[in-house]
Image (tube, grey):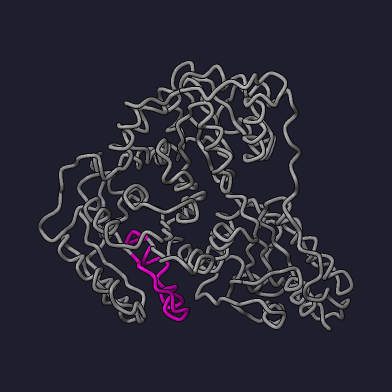
Amino acid sequence: MIAAEAVGRALAGLGVTTVFGVAGSGNFHVTNALVAGGARFVAARHEGGAATMADAYARVSGRPGLLSVHQGPGLTNAITGIAEAAKSRTPLLVLAGEAGDPRSNFAIDQDALAAAVGAVPMRAHSGETAVDDAIRAYRTAVRERRTVLLNLPLNVQNEMAKTPPSAGAALVPEAAAVPAPPPETIARLGELLLAARRPVFIAGRGARGARAELTALADRVGALLATSAVAKGLFRGDPWDLDVSGGFATPLAAELIRGADVIVGWGCALNMWTTRHGALIGPGATLVQVDLEEDAIGRHRPVEFGVCGEAAETARLTLWYLSGLGPAGGGAGPWPGYRSRELAVRIAGERRWRDVPYADTGGGGRIDPRTLSIGLDDLLPQERIVSVDSGNFMGYPSMFLSVPDEDGFCFTQAFQSVGLGLATAIGAALARPDRLPVAALGDGGALMGIAELETVVRLGLPMVIVVYDDEAYGAEVHHFGPDGHPLGTVTFPPADLARIARGFGCAGLTVRSRADLAGVADWLSGPRDRPLLIDAKVTSEQPSWWLEEAFRGH
């Protein structure tokens, strides 16, 4: 068996079930070997889309992602999606052919390219070692939570290889175990929470799956609950849930987080987005960060106290300490902390953005994006998974479309690239086929990634694609327009996106008022045998407040 086939068979034997990519001559044999080994190959129309699909699939499924691309341009086409995954610490293995002859048109420094965006470059060194090299790369991706590029030189691919591991071999790696925090660290955290009068927990991506442990500890110490954007939905249904902290926070959430005397970030970077450049951290508040990685603690903001540990285990041990089973817990609690009957009433009535009054700006053939989002929230089934692209519009679906839990929201925004949203929705949809996939895009991002509409149709995904169409790159319009700069480079003539979508095989609907949403209800009540693209002609006079946060971070 040649090395290319052995590597594909070996990875299938490790438990890889889904691989995304675009097949070319440099990755043809390894991709076919993965399929022969039992993996499903999801063919994208562009490598950039394939990379983002693999990233989103990994985020939602909890399984490592796998991407297969051609050498040279296949890899460069994918690099934006790879950068997003690397910045997000997504466990993702990229298989890329590599030109062995420096005179080849395809020859580039693929190691340097991967390293430049934060991925880990590795290589199959020979036919004899190819299987071991592939297993090592896969283990690195999973155990270290990294995006790894495995270069597969063309000459090595054609060498004879060792027999690959058989399917079902007990080789599936797990994430590296993180030691539990020492008792003195748990005691310090427990005593800090014991003394807190207004504690707030902010959970990030690293706290996904830790809801039960975090809510139990929060109930003990009277903490309010919030999340970063990527963990939206984690505490959905809890009476003390404030939803998202940061630029998307409701006025009530911002007020209460700013009023906290102790803020604990659980698997949360506490970066400028989640804290509004520190504006949500009140004067004198004690900031604590719990993270799997020591070097992540304090990376974005100085913290008074850092705990290196897994979120669920750290919360469980702290609750154990405070419940009197530890050396100084004394069996005390629960404490009221930040919670009160009056505050519960406020949270119930002001928790959601749709509860915040606004003056509707719709009219003249355009719909207010808030009215659009609220209307869709009422119509779409609750069992949904919402994926959001980047741009001026992005806060509207993020704030006004509810999700059932943390698996209901996929937010590929670490690199802030426009154009990843549709591919994100495809990867998320394949990870959770039991839910209605919803892609929320701006018109700029929709047109950047529009080739993947064919992928949505070909895969038979019953997806709702919402385009917030302001006929511009709205972020630049609102950032530079007030200073009198010419905007001809960032504004565009109207495009009939619904008609374009119908050309791909979608159902297309143009929405200019709330009444037009009746077409969405019709599609939902029908067979849903084609995806639905909604070209929503939205008002564009009002800039978004989260946009200013974004430009402050440039």
| Residue 458: in magenta span | yes
For the point 47% across and 40% down, the residue is 227
Residues in magenta, as a range: 440-465
Q: Percent position (x, y) of residue 121?
A: 72, 58
Q: Percent position (x, y) of residue 533?
A: 31, 70
Q: Percent position (x, y) of residue 415?
A: 51, 50
On-image quarter of the C terminus: top left
Q: Indicate left or right for 10 with 460 as reference.
A: right
**Quadrant location of residue 141?**
bottom right
Query: Viewer-proximal residue, 416 or 335?
Result: 335
Q: Is residue 155 visible?
A: no
For the point 61% across and 79% down, the residue is 23
On-image quarter of the N terminus: bottom right
Q: Indicate left or right for 549 with 231 as reference.
A: left
Q: Is residue 548 above or below residue 21?
A: above
Q: Indicate left or right for 71 with 393 as reference.
A: right
Query: Viewer-proximal residue, 203 or 449?
Result: 203
For the point 69% across and 34% down, the residue is 308
Q: Is residue 526 visible?
A: yes
